[in-house]
Amino acid sequence: AEARETAARLEGHKLEIQVKVGEGGRLFGSVTSADVASALKHHGFTVDKRKIELPETVKSTGIYTVHIKLHPEVSAAVEVQVTPTAKE
């Protein structure tokens, strides 16, 4: 029941992760499940990074749908927008 409640709150949630980018919007490294877990923590959700399923290796800016498995029968989809950090 608790997993369903958390899934309902998470479902459709939008996260923004800012990263350093090089030429053509390519990332230095990639966005990992740990990055997504950290962003979720800023929004008040504590999720184990092993429960976060990235659709593919995130190596460029854009919008990605990430699935979070809260329980064997309960999962939620979260939209993650990867944006470049502001240039100073």
Image (cartoon, helix red, strand yellow):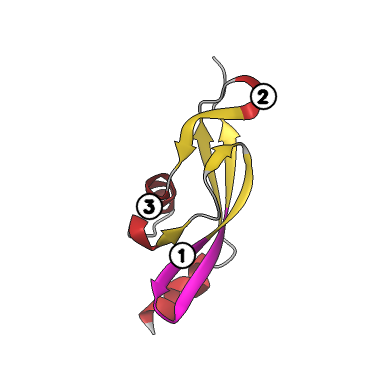
User: Of helix, strand and loop, which one carries label 1?
Assistant: strand
Image-based side of 45 in relation to 12, left or right: left
**Amino acid carrying mark 1 in the image:** Ile
- Residue labelled with disc 2: 24
Q: Are marks 1 and 3 in contact (CB under 8 Å)?
A: no
Image-based side of 39 in relation to 66, left or right: left
Q: Earlier in the sequence, mark 1 or mark 3?
A: 3
- Residue labelled with disc 3: 41
User: Which residue is found at the position 54% from the left and 43% from the top?
Assistant: 58
Identify the image quadrant of the C terminus.
top right
Q: Is residue 46 visible?
A: no
State how far apart marks 3 and 2 are (Cα): 30 Å
State how far apart marks 1 and 3 are (Cα): 13 Å
Give the answer, above or below, for where 28 lies relative to 56.
above
Neighbourhood count class around disc 3 (C-alpha, 10 Å): few under 14, some 14–19, many 20 upward? few
**Amino acid carrying mark 2 in the image:** Gly
Magenta span contains residue 78: yes
Which of the two discs, 1 and 3, sits closer to the camera? Answer: 1
Which disc, if any, is residue 68? 1
Q: Where's residue 82, x and y in %?
A: 57, 40
What range of the chain is rendered magenta? 67-79
Give the answer, above or below, for where 38 lies relative to 50.
above
Magenta span contains residue 69: yes
